[in-house]
Image: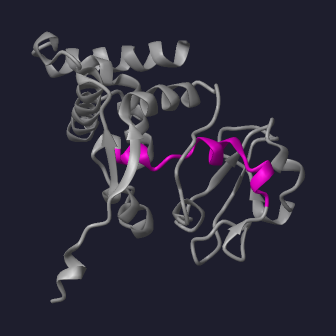
Amino acid sequence: MNSSSLVVERIEAGAFGHWLAQAQAALRGRGGMDVPCGECVGCCTSNYSILLRPVDAALDIVPASVLSSVPGMHYPHAKMNPRSDGSCPMFSSGRCAIYAQRPQTCLDYDCRVFAAAGMQAGDDKPVINRRIRAWVFNYENAAAQRAHQAIQSAARFIRQHADAFPHGWVPRTPAGIAVLALKVHEVFLEQSRMPDCIADQITAIVQASQRFDAV
């Protein structure tokens, strides 16, 4: 085996504390993510359905033929389903055809959330998984490093005890679980203060998520 094949790519993901603050703001609708994508177009080619919100300018641009309704959401919410090859219908000639007017879903997407949670994006997303493995955060201080560890602890707990949460509460997708772990990670910052009972731990997590979404 060629030794060069054993070399794992490393890509700077940035300062973790800064990334976390930006990600929290984006989840609360206060701006998108500044992702150092480089030449990577994994999110455009990895079989994602893209939600379009009423405020998205893309609703006036995207052909109706590539849109479908969203169960549980009324018009004008819609989604773009991927092509049979997994690419977004607005992905053309190696780039996004509506980049300047891309939906908020795209502005918010940041595969570093998987690296933060210590997770992969799913078996059907090999391009993104390679990128996740390549991301390397740095830490401004000990608090940033503890926050990263807490997010990973939250993600592990949610996956291990998913069936113990209220029915339908735990997201079904890796992306949803990673985002939830980010929202509730403060519960895991002080492990010594965690309740001993799993049911009480789950209650604390649910309450933390509700507090996050209420801000």
Q: Where residue 198 sits: x, y (%)?
A: 16, 22
Point out residue 10 in the picture as x, y percentages from the top left corner: 32, 59
**Residue 170 vs residue 81: left or right?**
left
Q: Which span of residues is magenta-colored?
A: 98-115
Identify which residue, 99 or 195, lies in the foreground: 99
Whether residue 206 is situated above or below residue 165 in the rendered picture? above
Identify the residue shown where x is 64% and y is 27%: 29
Q: In this view of the protein, which residue sits in the foreground, 152 or 203?
A: 152
Residue 79 shows in the view = yes
Q: Where's the N terminus, which quadrant?
A: bottom left
Any part of residue 172 in sight = no
Q: Is residue 183 above or below residue 212?
A: below
Residue occupying image coordinates x 15% and y 10%: 193
Looking at the picture, does residue 124 appear above or below residue 157?
below
| x 53%, y 56%: residue | 37
Q: Hey, which quadrant is residue 126 in on the image? A: bottom left
Q: Nearer the viewer, residue 69 or 36?
A: 36
